[in-house]
Amino acid sequence: MATTLFKIVFEGQLRNGVELQTAKFNLAQLFKSEVSAVEKLFNGNPVALKRGLSQGDAQVYLNALNDAGVEARIE
């Protein structure tokens, strides 16, 4: 039996009420990197942030991204 795996996709969209600089700072903290390293994620193109996740793990990642102020989706 094959296990279905999921990925987290981000296209640079912010949650309502979140400013761009705040979201960049939050993502940098989440990824333990510099703000300059996450800036390229905000170009409007879809980027797979994480692959090969179980549905539960994908939801945990999605919740963390939402808490950081960005919109992402599970595929």
Image: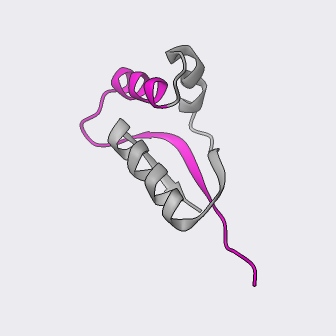
User: Is 47 included in the stretch rendered in magenta?
Assistant: no
Q: In the image shown, does 64 or 38 lie closer to the viewer?
A: 64
Q: Where is residue 5 in the image (x, y as percent from the top left)?
A: 66, 66
Whole-percent x and y of residue 7?
62, 56
In the image, 25: left or right of 2?
left
Q: Which residue is drawn at 58% across and 50% down?
A: 9
Whether residue 4 is in magenta: the answer is yes
Question: Looking at this view, is 36 or 19 the one in front?
Answer: 36
Q: Quadrant location of the N terminus? A: bottom right
Residue 60 vs 18, above or below: the answer is: below
> Is 29 placed above or below 67 here?
above
Residue stretch rendered in magenta on the structure: 1-30
Q: Relative to residue 33, is residue 47 drawn left or right?
A: right
Q: Residue at x 43, y 43 (%)?
A: 65
Q: Which residue is drawn at 44% across and 24% down?
A: 29
Residue at the extreme right of the image, as rendered:
1
Residue 3 found in image quarter: bottom right
Residue 44 lies, in percent from the top left, at 56, 38
Q: Which of 62/40 is in front?
A: 62
